[in-house]
Image: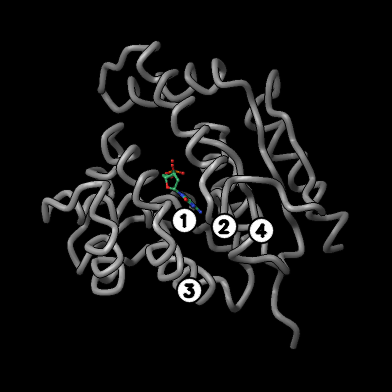
Amino acid sequence: MSRRPQIAIDGPVASGKSTIARLVADRLGYTYIDSGAMYRALAWAARERGITRDQKNEAAALARNIAIRLEPVPGGGNRVFVDGAEVTDEIRTLEIGQLASELSAVPAVRERLVAMQQEMAAGGGVVMEGRDIQTVVLPDAEVKIFLTASPEERARRRQLEFEQRGQQVDYEEVLAEIKGRDHRDMNREHSPLRPAPDAVHLDTIGLSIEQVVEKVLAIVKEKCG
Ligand code: DC
């Protein structure tokens, strides 16, 4: 029997990837995989050990030696574990996001995490979201979607997300962080954030979450029948 489809959703920070990917996975009965959570888990472990953004060799060794596990929550996101300890909530801070972006530029870190992601998606029936899923991790994915929205719109969404978790953050600070991460994620030498040549581009500005989900489901139907 041929494997079930792989759906790759990429886009910049706060483009709505996680929410959209989660809902699409839920509707299709597929497994949702948040690849960014794995880079965040690595950053969390690095910080615990006092490894800084400049310590590339240490970060690479850490990536080789820790066990990062994602556990899909039916109808929800992923619970995240590092060496058996749950870090699901701890990894959702601006600081960890920043360090994740910095350490994700280290080739040996990417190599290790990409291999883990490919293994997780091997059987198909997955919706995986990140930065390099359609270009590097799953270049043969049946569906490749690149989500976009302006930095200002994304900063507003991100600020709201933090508020909903009870964290107060400054809009200008979030906007600066988003622009900084966009720049680094798009301009890094290895696996920069960019659409695959055969990606479908979806600008989410002015669309509700439900409208974006419907559009993605329509694309899946068109590509996979
Ligand atoms: O999607 P996120 O904000 O949780 O990801 C955190 C960082 O991890 C992001 O700034 C870049 C990195 N990342 C990556 O390099 N490749 C991925 N597939 C996913 C995330």
Residue with the mark numbered 4: 135
The nearer-to-camera label among 3 and 1 is 3
Q: Nearer the viewer, residue 102 or 8?
A: 102
Colour approach in the figure: one colour
In the rendered structure, the answer to whether residue 31 lies left or right of residue 146 reads left
On the rendered image, what quadrant is the C terminus found in?
bottom right
Residue with the mark numbered 1: 35
Element under label 3? helix
Please tell me which of labels 2 and 4 falls first in the chain. 2
Q: Are marks 2 and 4 in contact (CB under 8 Å)?
A: no
Please tell me which of labels 3 and 4 falls first in the chain. 3
Residue 6, given in percent of the width and then of the height, sits at 67, 65
Residue 49, given in percent of the width and then of the height, sits at 11, 56
- Badge 4: few (under 14), some or many (20 or more) residues near its Cα, within 10 Å? many
Tell me which residue sits at (17%, 62%) in the image: 85
**Marks 1 and 2, Cα distance to the nearest angstrom?**
7 Å
Disc 1 within 8 angstroms of ligand 1 (CB): yes
Element under label 1? helix
Q: Are marks 1 and 2 in contact (CB under 8 Å)?
A: yes
Q: Which numbered tag is attached to residue 128? A: 2
- Badge 3: few (under 14), some or many (20 or more) residues near its Cα, within 10 Å? few
In the rendered structure, the answer to whether residue 65 lies left or right of residue 36 reads left
Which quadrant of the structure image shows residue 38?
A: bottom left
- Badge 1: few (under 14), some or many (20 or more) residues near its Cα, within 10 Å? many
**Marks 3 and 2, Cα distance to the nearest angstrom?**
14 Å
